[in-house]
């Protein structure tokens, strides 16, 4: 049982420190993952909070068929998809708000993605399509296995393998256009 699962079990048994530990461990990664859906770090932050509220209020059962992180991210994905369905009309944002959003996103991403190589890859990923960004984010930044990513994204393992392959080719091309050389991609 991983730490998230044991913390969740403790929370369900009445220990509030369990949910505090879960939030501390998973908040930043979940927020960046949800940002790949909504492209607005403040909305992603709200969706992250909604995901944790769902855990606290509804106390869904964790079956252990996947890792806790995979299970939590799939809940977050569903929260983001619900948000996108309800808010399919895109709001307009002023230039000042856009600069502030990009600044906030860069601050959070900078803290979470600490190495220079990961920052370069993260920047190049912004030009990829949404599905490619999501799969690469989950595989490389969140270090999830293909089976876990398939569970989160609602796809088969083979679909994820194909998606990763195409996403890596697209990322490599984007990085080469920017002058980056990333041999092990």
Image: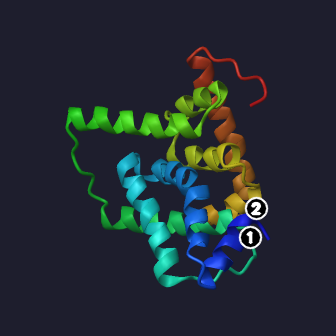
Quadrant of res 12: bottom right
Horizontal and vertical percent position of residue 92: 21, 45
**In the orientation shown, which residue stands out farthest toward the top?**
179
Whether residue 155 can be seen here: no
Horizontal and vertical percent position of residue 156: 71, 64
**Dot 1: what SS?**
loop
**Dot 2: what SS?**
helix
| Front residue of 176 and 75 | 75
Horizontal and vertical percent position of residue 46: 38, 59
Residue sitting at x 55%, y 62%: 23
| Front residue of 92 and 47 | 47
Q: Classify 125 as above or below 161.
A: above
Q: Classify 147 as above or below 117.
A: below
Residue sitting at x 42%, y 39%: 105
Q: Residues within 10 Å of mark 1 (few under 14, many from 20)?
A: some
Q: CA distance from mark 1 to mark 2?
A: 9 Å
Q: Which mark is residue 80?
A: none
Whichever of callouts 1 and 2 sits on the residue coming sooner in the sequence is 1
Residue sitting at x 23%, y 51%: 91
Q: Residues within 10 Å of mark 2 (few under 14, many from 20)?
A: some
Horizontal and vertical percent position of residue 67: 73, 67
Visual colour scheme: rainbow
Q: Classify 13 as above or below 182.
A: below
In this rendering, would 94 be left or right of 125?
Answer: left
In this rendering, would 51 be left or right of 17?
Answer: left
The residue beneath circle 1 is 66
Q: Nearer the viewer's eye, disc 1 or disc 2?
A: 1
| Front residue of 180 and 55 | 55
Cβ atoms at labels 1 and 2 below 8 Å apart: yes
The residue beneath circle 2 is 147
Residue sitting at x 30%, y 32%: 99
In this rendering, would 104 be left or right of 99?
Answer: right
């Amino acid at each position: 049982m991983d730490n998230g699962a044991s913390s969740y079990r403790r929370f369900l048994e009445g220990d509030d420190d369990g949910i505090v530990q879960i939030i501390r461990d998973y908040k930043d990664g979940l927020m960046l993952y949800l940002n790949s859906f909504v492209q607005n770090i403040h909305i992603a932050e709200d969706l992250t909070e909604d995901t944790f509220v769902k855990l606290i209020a509804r106390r869904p059962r964790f079956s252990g068929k996947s890792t806790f992180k995979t299970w939590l991210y799939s809940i977050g994905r569903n929260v983001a998809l619900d948000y996108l369905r309800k808010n399919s009309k895109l709001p307009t944002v002023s230039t000042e708000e856009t600069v502030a959003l990009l600044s906030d996103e860069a601050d959070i991403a900078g803290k979470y993605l600490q190495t220079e190589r990961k920052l370069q890859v993260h920047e190049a990923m912004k030009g990829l399509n949404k599905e490619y960004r999501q799969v690469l984010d989950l595989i490389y930044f969140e270090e999830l296995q293909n089976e876990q990513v398939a569970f989160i994204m609602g796809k088969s393992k083979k679909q994820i393998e194909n998606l990763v392959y195409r996403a890596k080719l697209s990322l490599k091309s984007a990085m080469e256009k920017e002058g980056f050389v990333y041999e092990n991609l």
